[in-house]
Amino acid sequence: MNSPSVFLSYAHDDKPWAEAFAAALRQQGVSLWFDEWDKLGDKPSEALDAALRRSETLVVVLDHLSVEKPALFFELGAALAMKKRIIPIVSEGVERSKIPVPLLRVRSLVKKDPQETAEEVARAVSAIAA
């Protein structure tokens, strides 16, 4: 199996949207790691770490819930340390002051319906790879 090009970070409270988004990304031909589909095994933290290491890009979905989750800061910190590309997707209504500073420095996408957002991310991933 090829390494996934995208590691998807999201709040589990947003699982229905994230799952539809992940499915739409795959339909767009984007290889990704999505925790609900990819086995975590006996040691979930090691599986997450390995998947993040193998990926090229962190796609992080920011909403009013995820900006408070420690997992966001772990995944973001790891991606920054590994010099991964980061594509933030920001939900409407998220206060700018709640967004981690490193994510304010990169162009973000607005969270829309899963299909439309996946098309934008697929274009961004293709442009980065080119």
Image: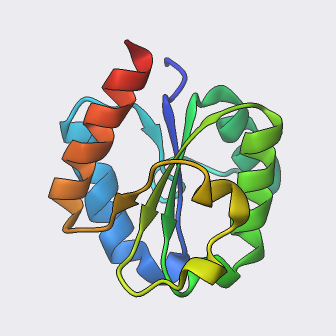
Tell how many labels: 0
Q: Quadrant of residue 125?
A: top left
Screen quadrant of the C terminus: top left
Looking at the image, the residue that sits furthest to the top is 130
- Identify which residue is drawn at 79% across, 46% down: 78
Q: Residue at x 32, y 64 (%)?
A: 110
69 vs 3, nearest the viewer: 69
What's the residue at 28%, 36% (across, down)? 122
Q: Is residue 67 above or below residue 6?
A: below
> Which residue shows up at 43% across the image and 78% down it?
14
**Left or right, 32 with reference to 40:** left
Question: 56 above or below 90?
Answer: above
Q: What percent of the width, then of the height, locates residue 45?
A: 80, 55
Q: Is residue 108 visible?
A: yes
Which of 113 and 26 lies nearest the eye of the viewer?
113
Task: State left or right for residue 32 relative to residue 119.
Answer: right
Q: How far across and how far down the image is residue 33, in percent?
A: 50, 42
Q: Quadrant of residue 119?
A: top left
Q: Position of residue 57 (x, y in %)?
A: 55, 35
Residue 44 seen from this side: no
Question: Colour scheme of this structure image?
Answer: rainbow
Q: Where in the figure is residue 61, as x and y percent of width and height?
A: 48, 64
Query: Closer to the camera, 10 or 124?
Result: 124
